Image (tube, rainbow, N blue to C red):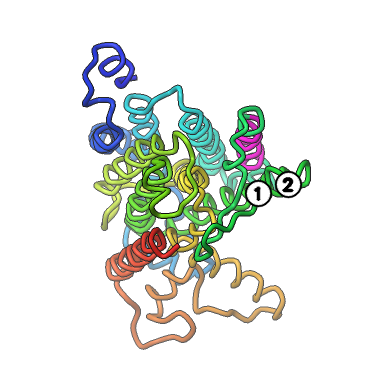
C-alpha cells in the first residue's frame, strides 16, 4: 500500500527498494506489536483468558509451572502478534504479488483455525479445544486451498519452477513435479501440505517455554529473508547456481514483518512471560515460515533452517509412537525435549538437576542460529 502511494504514485524511489521495505516492515510490525500488546494483555487478564501453561504430559512439570504462577498468565497473545504481522505486510509489501497475497490468506486462515481452537478451550468448561481430527481438517482446508491457487497460477503462467523441488548439495538437480501431469501435481500438493502443516504443528509444540518459539522464529525468519531475496534475483541465482523464482524477493518484506512482529511479542513473552502465544499465534507462524521456504524453493533445507522446531516435533512424535508400541515405556525423559532438559537436565537420562528455563531457551536459540547459519552456507556449497 505504502509502496503504491509513495513509489508508484509520488515517484519516491526509496520506497521501491525491497531491502528498505523489508526493514521498515520489521520496524512497523515491532512497534505495532508493542503498541497493541499492552492493552490486549490487560484485556486477556481481565477476562481470565488462560490455560495450562505446560505443553507436556508430565504432571510434575505442570505442577511446577503452576507453582511459578504460569497458570495465571494469559494466553492468545498470538492475536496481536498476527495482527501486527498482517498490518505491516499490507502496508509495506506489494499486493499485486501473488506470493504475498497467498501468504496473507495462509496466515489468516491458519490464525482462524488456531483462534477457534483457543476460543473453545477458554470459553467452554472442560473443553480441550478442537479435536485433533477437526483441527487437522481445518488446517488441511486452508493449506490445500492456497496450494491449489498456486498450482493454478503456475500452470496458467507456465512458471513450472514453482512446482519443482531442488535437493540441496546436488548441483543442477531438479524434481520437476509440474511436468509429471496429474500425478506430479498430486505429489506436489501432498508434499507441500506435509511441509506447511508439519511446520505449523512444530511451532505449536515448541511454544512451551517463555520466549522459545518467538526467539527461534526470529532466527529462522532472518535466514528465510536471505533465501527469498536471493531467489528472486536472477543475477545472484546464476552466480550461486540456485533456482530463480520471479518476484520471490518481495517475500523478504513478509519475512521482515514476521521477524518484527515476533520481536514485539518477545518483549512481553520473555521470561517471566506476561502472555503466551496460543494456537492462534503458533499455527500461522509455522505456516508462514513454511510458505517462505516454499516460495524460495528451500523446502528440503527447511529442517536445517528450522532445526529446533523440527527436533521438538520429532521428539514428541517419537515419544508418542514409542509409548504406544512399547506398552508404556518412554524414549525420552520428557517430550518435547526442552521440557526434559528443564526438569531432568537430560534428554535420554535423568541428571541430578534440571536446567533453568532461561538456560534452555537461550541454548535453543543458539542451536537455532547454528542451523540457520548452516543453511545459509548451502547457498555457496551448492
Examine the residues drawn in magenta and state their main secondary structure.
helix
**Split into 4 quadrants, where in the image is the N terminus?**
top left
**Above or below, 162 relative to 61:** above
**Above or below, 111 relative to 328:** above
Most extreme residue toward the top is 9
Q: Nearer the viewer, residue 340 or 160?
A: 160
**Above or below, 170 relative to 292:** below
Percent x, y of residue 106: 53, 35
Q: Nearer the viewer, mark 1 or mark 2?
A: 1
Task: Name the residue at 59% across, 46% down.
Answer: 127
Q: Which residue is mark 1?
A: 176
| Image marks 1 and 2: residues in contact by CB distance under 8 Å | yes
Extent of the magenta region? 138-152
Task: Name the residue at 51% across, 56% down.
Answer: 202
Percent x, y of residue 97: 46, 27
Q: What's the mark number on residue 329?
A: none
Q: Secondary structure at mark 1?
A: loop
Percent x, y of residue 99: 49, 33
Q: Is residue 56 visible?
A: yes
Is residue 148 found inside the magenta-colored segment of the image?
yes
Which quadrant holds residue 256?
top left
Which quadrant holds residue 2?
top left
Q: Is residue 286 visible?
A: no
Percent x, y of residue 4: 33, 17
Q: Secondary structure at mark 2?
A: helix
- In space, the residues marked 1 and 2 are separated at their CA atoms by 8 Å
The local crowd at label 1, few if under 14, some if 14 to 19, many if 20 or more residues have their Cα within 10 Å, is some
Q: Which residue is mark 2?
A: 184
Q: Is 341 on the left or on the right of 279, as rendered? A: left
Amino acid at each position: 500500500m505504502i509502496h503504491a502511494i509513495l513509489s508508484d504514485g509520488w515517484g519516491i524511489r526509496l520506497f521501491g527498494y525491497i531491502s528498505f521495505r523489508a526493514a521498515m516492515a520489521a520496524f512497523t510490525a515491532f512497534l505495532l506489536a508493542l503498541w497493541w500488546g499492552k492493552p490486549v494483555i490487560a484485556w486477556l487478564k481481565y477476562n481470565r483468558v488462560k490455560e495450562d501453561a505446560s505443553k507436556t504430559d508430565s504432571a510434575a512439570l505442570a505442577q511446577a509451572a503452576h507453582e511459578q504462577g504460569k497458570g495465571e498468565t494469559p494466553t492468545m497473545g498470538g492475536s496481536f502478534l498476527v495482527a501486527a504481522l498482517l498490518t505491516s505486510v499490507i502496508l509495506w509489501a506489494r499486493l499485486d504479488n501473488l506470493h504475498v497475497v497467498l501468504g496473507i490468506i495462509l496466515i489468516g486462515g491458519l490464525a482462524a483455525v488456531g483462534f477457534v481452537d483457543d476460543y473453545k478451550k477458554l470459553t467452554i468448561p472442560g473443553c480441550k479445544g478442537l479435536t485433533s481430527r477437526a483441527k487437522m481438517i481445518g488446517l488441511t482446508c486452508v493449506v490445500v486451498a492456497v496450494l491449489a491457487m498456486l498450482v493454478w497460477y503456475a500452470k496458467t503462467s507456465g512458471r513450472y519452477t514453482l512446482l519443482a523441488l531442488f535437493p540441496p548439495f546436488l548441483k543442477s538437480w531438479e524434481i520437476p513435479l509440474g511436468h509429471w501431469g496429474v500425478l506430479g501435481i498430486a505429489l506436489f500438493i501432498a508434499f507441500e501440505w506435509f511441509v506447511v502443516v508439519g511446520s505449523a504443528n512444530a511451532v505449536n509444540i515448541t511454544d512451551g517455554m517463555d520466549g522459545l518459539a518467538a526467539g527461534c522464529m526470529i532466527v529462522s525468519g532472518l535466514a528465510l529473508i536471505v533465501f527469498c531475496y536471493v531467489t528472486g534475483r536472477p543475477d545472484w541465482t546464476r552466480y550461486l547456481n540456485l533456482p530463480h523464482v520471479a518476484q520471490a524477493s518481495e517475500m523478504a518484506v513478509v519475512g521482515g514483518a514476521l521477524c518484527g512482529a515476533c520481536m514485539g511479542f518477545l518483549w512481553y513473552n520473555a521470561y517471566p512471560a506476561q502472555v503466551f502465544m496460543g494456537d492462534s499465534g503458533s499455527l500461522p507462524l509455522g505456516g508462514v515460515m513454511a510458505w517462505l521456504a516454499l516460495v524460495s524453493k528451500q523446502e528440503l533445507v527447511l529442517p536445517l533452517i528450522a532445526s529446533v522446531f523440527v527436533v521438538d516435533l520429532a521428539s514428541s512424535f517419537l515419544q508418542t509412537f514409542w509409548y504406544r508400541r512399547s506398552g508404556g515405556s518412554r524414549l525420552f525423559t520428557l517430550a518435547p525435549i526442552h521440557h526434559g532438559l528443564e526438569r531432568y537436565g537430560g534428554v535420554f537420562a535423568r541428571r541430578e538437576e534440571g536446567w533453568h528455563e532461561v538456560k534452555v531457551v537461550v541454548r535453543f536459540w543458539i542451536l537455532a542460529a547454528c542451523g540457520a547459519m548452516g543453511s545459509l552456507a548451502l547457498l555457496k556449497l551448492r
